[in-house]
Image (tube, grey):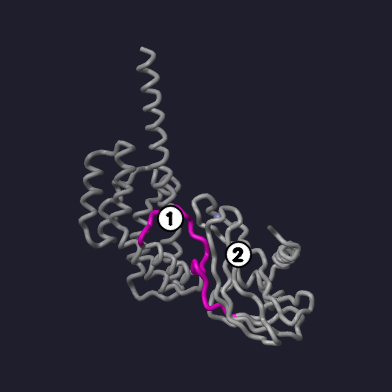
Amino acid sequence: MATEQDQTEAHQNTEERQDKAGIGPSSFSLFLETKPPSQMLSVTNLWLNPKNHNFLQIRSPDLQLHCDSESCNGTRYFRYKSGERELYNGSTQRNIFLTYLCSNCEVSQKMFAIHVVIDRESGDGGKCYKFGEYPAFGPATPTRLLRLLKRDREIFLKGRRCEAQGLGIGAFGYYRRVVENQKNMILDQIIAVAQRVGASADAISQLHAAKNETQFTKAILSVKDALPQSLLIGGHHNPLTLLHKALSDGLHARSDEHCLELAQDIRLVLADLADRLSVALKDEAELNAAIARLGKVGLNDL
Ligand SMILES: [Zn+2]
């Protein structure tokens, strides 16, 4: 149940978000939500002094975070669940762990490990250093793409974190590894779509043959014409050709900025492909179920 203190904090939290913080010190909620680890930062609304007792308490504002559970898959409110937040006897520093729980699905958790330094003179501020958080810091990634990547999900998320911090060569390297590792899985999904849309036997055998080609760039180039129409971006851009272009280009000694652009392109094309694969396979599954149902109706009517 939300206490009065929690409600007050939630209210302040909203006001601060409207302030468009980013210049000057962050509120504690924005620090938790948006700041990457490993920086000592000035923070406001960090602590309170309940009833003037001989201790201070670190605040636990509601947070808006991405929840990647199947039922949420979007930004949700997370509420404080556990973690010691008290500083006694005039102490000004403490390492704390905070655990938050998604208030929508009540399944996803977020944990923060933080070093806090209280500035008693400031009234409610101080400094904070995030050792880390779990799941790791990084912008949201579509659930369908993460599901597609399965065991390479963590490598992909490392690429995402590099990208978020402008580390182009790093992001490109991680994404290339993911795409190369998952080549056959991506081809399997494309084959499943090709079979369902009634592609020619020739196209399907080309797709199968590409699975034996060890080099990803060669493999995708060999099957670009065998790709089902429904997987083309905007009806005519071939995602395999785009991936081939981006991955081949980055092999040369390109600048960090250029690699960052290529990494963004690879991620966007992969996310779009994951969406199209998922929709194509789902639509077809629904269609088959409808055909089966209608088939039964027909038989009974005879
Ligand atoms: Zn959730």
- Residue 2 falls in image quadrant: bottom right
Of residues 12 and 25, which is closer to you in this image? 12
Residue 25, image x, y percentages: 68, 78
Q: CA distance from mark 1 to mark 2?
A: 29 Å
Query: Which quarter is ligand 1 in?
Result: bottom right
Instruction: Please give the residue where the numbered disc 2 appears in the rendered image.
Output: 81
Q: In what quadrant of the picture does the N terminus appear?
A: bottom right
The residue that appears at 22% across and 61% down in the rendered structure is: 214
Q: Tell me which segment is drawn in magenta.
A: 129-151
For ligand 1, tell me if the residue under mark 1 lies within 8 Å: no
**The residue under label 1 is which amino acid type?**
Leu
Residue depicted at 64% across the width and 70% down the height: 30
The image shows residue 217 at horizontal and vertical percentages of: 29, 61
Query: Residue furthest toward the top?
Result: 302
Side (left or right) of 254 relative to 30: left
Which label number is shown at residue 145?
Answer: 1
Q: Is residue 163 above or below residue 2?
A: below
Tag in front: 1 or 2: 2
**136 or 139, which is in the foreground?**
136
From the viewer's perspective, tell me whether residue 132 is left or right of residue 52. Answer: left
Q: Is residue 236 left or right of residue 217?
A: right
Q: Secondary structure at mark 2?
A: strand
Question: What SS does tag 1 mark?
Answer: helix
Q: Residue at x 27, y 51 (%)?
A: 223
For image coordinates 55% across by 72% down, the residue present is 112
Q: Nearer the viewer, residue 108 or 1?
A: 1
Farthest residue toward the right? 51
